[in-house]
Amino acid sequence: MTDSLPGTPPPTPPTPPQPPSSSPEEPFGALQALARGWEILLGDFVNLWLAGLLFVVVGIGVGLLGAIPCIGAFFSIASTLFVTPQLYTGLLHVALRRTDGASVQPLDLFEGFRSKFVQSLVAFLPLWGIILIVTVPLFLLIIGGMSLSTDAAPNEDVVAILVFLLFMSPAYLFLAVVCLFFIFVPAVIWDLGVSSPALEPVKRSFRLVRDHIWTMLLLGILIVAILTAAWIVGTLLLCVGVFVTVPAATLWCALAVAVLYRQWTRESDVGAGN
């Protein structure tokens, strides 16, 4: 090493390289979940589409049974308790397994009936109770309003529109938000043991949605838009296209929900560990 010249300051040691500045991670939101869900859907399209097709066919079949005169109401009530919760639980089972990288088969959709029948039934009872509390008074109000309009004035359409704007629209929005708070219930059911409290899935789903309310509101709007577009496009394709577009859209949305659930529960687990 050469000596410094007299009167000159000693050479400054080189500055060690600084680690790259880590910018805070972008929050994982609705658009990222849909993008990731789309990738997963394309990675195993046939099996996932077939599972979605079974979901749609069973849903249409239950709806047709509910439309039978006289006994249709019985089928509607029975399916609300013994088909719909288990079917949605099976749908999230398929989405969660594929999100976790496991293989799935179309008949996995019915796993909710085989292994989570009672848990699904109990966990969705609060939702059905809220829907009843909101819709029964509205139904009676509409019937009363229509009878008054028939007796008092010929402008039935005006009364019907006013009733819809003043009561039905807010009620539908309220119920949509309530349903949003139950969106993770099927996913939580699969993560909990049989000995867990019956309403624990509702509590955990409520907390997840509450902590990410704006993301969930956006996801809810996007899910409605995606499913509506799938029905419209499928109907335009000679109606048969519904059995292509709607199952694919249904699984896409379920995968987005599963991706968000896994992301947020992983983050909460890491936070709890720290």
Image (spheres, grey):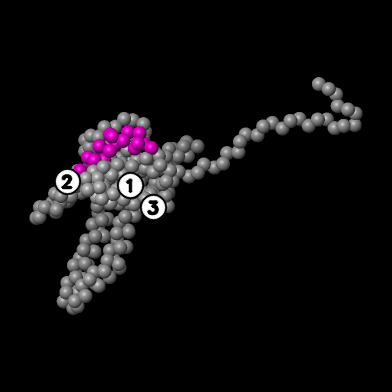
- Location of mark 3 (residue): 217
The residue lying furthest to the top in this view is 1
Q: Which residues are magenta?
A: 39-57
The amino acid sitting under disc 2 is Gly
The amino acid sitting under disc 1 is Ile
Viewer-side residue, 155 vs 124: 155
Front: mark 3 or 2: 2
For the residues marked 1 and 2, what is the alpha-carbon distance in whole angstroms?
23 Å
**Residue 253 left/right relative to 85:** right
- Residue 99 in percent (x, y) is at 36, 35
Element carrying mark 3 = helix
Who's the residue at 34% across and 37% down the image? 41
Residue 115, by quadrant, is top left
Viewer-side residue, 182 vs 153: 153
Mark 1 crowd level (few <14, some 14–19, many ≥20, 10 Å Cα)? many
Q: Is residue 87 visible?
A: no
Element carrying mark 2 = helix
Residue 166, by quadrant, is bottom left
Q: Is residue 7 magenta?
A: no
Q: Is residue 45 magenta?
A: yes
Mark 2 crowd level (few <14, some 14–19, many ≥20, 10 Å Cα)? few
Who's the residue at 28% across and 34% down the image? 46
- Location of mark 1 (residue): 183
